Amino acid sequence: MALDSWGRQRAAAALTRALTVWRRSIQVRVVASTVVLSAVVIGAVFWFLLQQTRDGLLEQSERAAVTEATRVTEEARQRLRAVPPTETDAPQQLADLVEPIIALGETREFAVVLSGPAGESRIADSAQYTPRLDTSSVPDSLESHFQGLAGTAFTYTEIRRSTEDGSLDREPGIVVGSQVRLPADSRTYTLYYLFPLTEEGRTLGLLGRAMLTAAGLLLLLVAALTWLVTRQVVTPVRMARRVAERLAAGQLQERLKVSGEDDLARLATSFNQMASNLQRQIRQLEELSRMQRRFVADVSHELRTPLTTVRMAGDVLHDAREDFDPVTARAAELLQTELDRFERLLVDLLEISRFDAGAAGLDLDDVNLVDVARRMADATLVLAQQHGIQVLVDAPDRPCLAEADVRRVERIVRNLVTNAIDHADSRDILIRVAGDEHAAAIAVRDHGVGLAAGESALVFNRFWRADPARARTSGGTGLGLSISLEDTHLHGGWLQAWGRPGEGSQFRLTLPRRSGTVLRHSPLPLVPDDVREPTG
């Protein structure tokens, strides 16, 4: 049983490898298709030729058999006419008739059966015939034909002879029937000549083997030619694929080798030109991106010094606003608010710069997402009260742990909650927490304006807003969700969004339990449970 199972596994593995080669190799498919079609055509042509040859051989054998039987019968008739009918009786004439023919048949390799007289029963045990011949070799249909007076006729049969060990030797043949009249009793007897088709069978067998050999060699030649032709076409394509893969991997200096002036050479030249243009454009974009990142970082750093000075003056004005008239006091408050927002924007820009430069790192520790959710609900309590809503937490009693950077996870959840408050439309926000042995997740659900189709992917773009006319009330910078996505990627997690116009939205953060492991699923659904599917 173990060997059978091992054999089945080997066969399944071989079949899988064959199917993989069939799917991936154009050359194999072209060669196999060409060989199969060639085999069908060659088989049809050879079968037609074999049938024509067989029919020709049989037709020639028929003519030869009928001619031989007619000639032998005519000689027998002449012998009978040369003997006076009064000198011999009927049995003697029958013996004189058939014995020379039997002897001649043994010399020329045909058998003889003498049956009759006409009108009586079919071939009987008393019939005279070639030794060891089975008289059943004469078909019943031919015997029926010669029950009365009839001309020469023939048909195909199976000649059966007894061997020395008592078995029957069978071979195809032609049986020709012809009648003679015996002068002694004026009755008609039938002579059956059985001619074997052994030589014709050997000829057809030899011809068939020759055709099979020729067909095999021709198919090998077709396969070799097809392989050679397709190789000349497929090899440059494979080289182009490998070069394209290396280009996609960032090796922009890779080029195809150009040889000749044919279509494939021109294709390689065009491919190289395309690769050069892409390399130049990518380098230009990389340079522009590098300059942009450098500009943002430099501007952010340079603005911190004047911002500190302005912040000091703003703090003085804000602290002394009680002594100002109402308009000036309100201006001092607005200045303080915008300075806070400007400072947060600079912090976010510096954080984005660190992400772009690849300088961001993680300070990993076991983080309980239940505690994070509750802390963020408390941290946004004042902002939620200003909007007349509540931030509710739905979390299990047990901890939902994940190996993560607590500062970055709190920033992600805070950004999600403040974003939900901005779009809640005076309806409460729900934070759900769940975890299992592989992952832990937090989902923030609001029932506000929602997201239109396609906006769930755009919402994480920098400075993107679903409704540009909508006021930003939380003091956000437009970079919060982008930073949250980068923080999530650092952890190897997922940050996904769902939304539907009029039904709100839900953002889900999923983190692996252990850093470095690959996420396979999330403990929380992305689509909220309270959403009803549209009915059509």
Image (cartoon, rainbow, N blue to C red):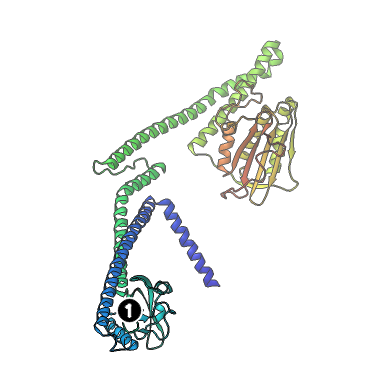
Which quadrant, please, contains the C terminus? top right
Residue at the spot 54% in from the left edge and 42% down from the top edge: 361
Q: Where is residue 346 in the image (x, y as percent from the top left)?
A: 56, 28
Which amino acid does the dot numbered 1 rest on?
Arg
* Mark 1 lies on residue: 181
Residue at the spot 32% in from the left edge and 88% down from the top edge: 89
Residue at the spot 62% in from the left edge and 27% down from the top edge: 476
Which quadrant, please, contains the N terminus? bottom right
**Above/below status of 210 relative to 409:** below
Q: Position of residue 62 (x, y in %)?
A: 30, 69
Residue that extends furthest to the front in the rendered view of this protein: 86
**Above/below status of 17 relative to 464:** below
Q: Is 322 on the left or on the right of 463, as rendered?
A: right
Q: Where is residue 186 in the image (x, y as percent from the top left)?
A: 34, 80
Q: Is 244 on the left or on the right of 63, as rendered?
A: right
Nearest the eye: 80 or 35: 80
Picture quadrant where residue 345 is located:
top right
Nearest the eye: 208 or 371: 208
Nearest the eye: 453 or 427: 453
Picture quadrant where residue 108 is located:
bottom left
**Above/below status of 459 relative to 205:** above
- Characterize the local packing of mark 1: few (<14), some (14-19) or many (20 or more) Cα atoms within 10 angstroms: some
Q: Is mark 1 on a helix, strand or loop?
A: strand
Picture quadrant where residue 268 is located:
top left
Nearest the eye: 381 or 529: 529
